[in-house]
Image (cartoon, rainbow, N blue to C red):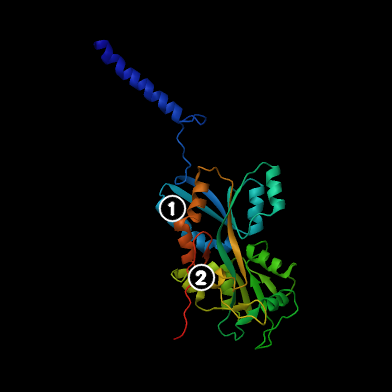
Amino acid sequence: MKIQKICKPIVLFVFALTLFTACNHPQNPLAYQTDTHGRGKAVVYIEEAFKPLFKTSIETFQGQYPKATILPKYMGENDIIQAMYDRKAKTIVISRDLNDKELKYLQSVKIEVRRDKIAVDAIALIIHPSNKDTLITVQELKSLLTGKNVKWKSSGKDIKVVYDKPNSANYNYLTKLCGKQANNKQIYAAKSNDEVINFVKNNPNAIGVIGLNWISDDDDFDTKDFLNGINVMAVAKDNKSEYFQPYNGFMYTKEYPLIRDIWMINKGKRSGLHTGFVLFMKNEIGQTIIQQAGLVPANSPIRLIQFTGQ
């Protein structure tokens, strides 16, 4: 009996030591996983045009998962894609899906990615409140960007166009819209979307090109501050069409013409935090945040209500 009393704790200790060793061995299937859907640390490269949306989303995600840390890295779209090429980025947020050439390259270097559209966003055109030219067509915008029409109708003064920065999603959108690189000596690059907003507030002859989510969330204090001192232009497809401002109902029906998508491209492991954050943005809570931010969620229906006069 004495021998049993002495041997029993020794056996338990050896068993416990074995478990401890197994759990801390990186190759062991029983190893404790520090990176899961709701735990760990992940760096996410995000196009700066979507910063307000993801600031709220990350705060909500980390509130739900206290052991998770999402570290956003806000950059221009082209630099973000390059970071994925260079294997620096596991999860990126950009304004489009990857094209066939990009996918073929990633496949050639054995990088497997999963691509998810999470929202429909828009380009917003902002002007100074004193400006009487509140309407613009897509063709007029194209002409402005290519130097064919560079004056305001009401004042006859030169138009200054300002966007965030080269290689950004906003600039890429303008380039795609024109079918070529925007070429106008009156087009200026700032350093960020908020600097574009401030430039327009101080320049009555300017038109600013920003991501909609910088000014679309009515419940956000920063948004209210940004909206104080600017107006948002209404845009028509052509001079025979109706003008619309970028409300999510008009984005959903595509009546507002300057729309684009938000995509999350992820090569993080399926059981890890990178994937957990993507799933969060795709599912109910993330999609609700997107809708509350004034954008169109990709995976949740929008209820359109039409009011008619009696």
Hey, which quadrant is residue 74 in on the image? bottom right
Looking at the rendering, in which quadrant would you find the C terminus? bottom left
Does residue 215 appear in the picture of this structure? no
Do callouts 2 and 1 mark residues in contact (Cβ within 8 Å)?
no
Q: Amino acid at mark 1?
A: Gln
Mark closest to the chain's N terminus, 2 or 1: 1
Picture coordinates of residue 309, whole percent (x, y): 46, 85
Q: Position of residue 281 (x, y in %)?
A: 50, 55
Name the residue tied to disc 1. 62
Q: Position of residue 33 (x, y in %)?
A: 47, 37
Residue 149 appears at what percent x and percent y?
73, 81
10 Å crowding of disc 2: few (<14), some (14-19), many (20+): many
Amino acid beneath label 2: Ser
Q: For the view shown, which residue lies furthest in the front direction?
A: 310
- Rendering quarter of residue 128: bottom right
Residue found at x 43% / y 69%: 219
Residue 79 - label = none
Asked if residue 278 is positioned above or below residue 10 in the image, the reply reads below
The residue depicted at 63 percent of the width and 63 percent of the height is: 169
Pick whichever, 297 or 19, lies toward us.
Answer: 297
Viewer-nearest of discs 2 and 1: 2
Name the residue tied to disc 2: 216
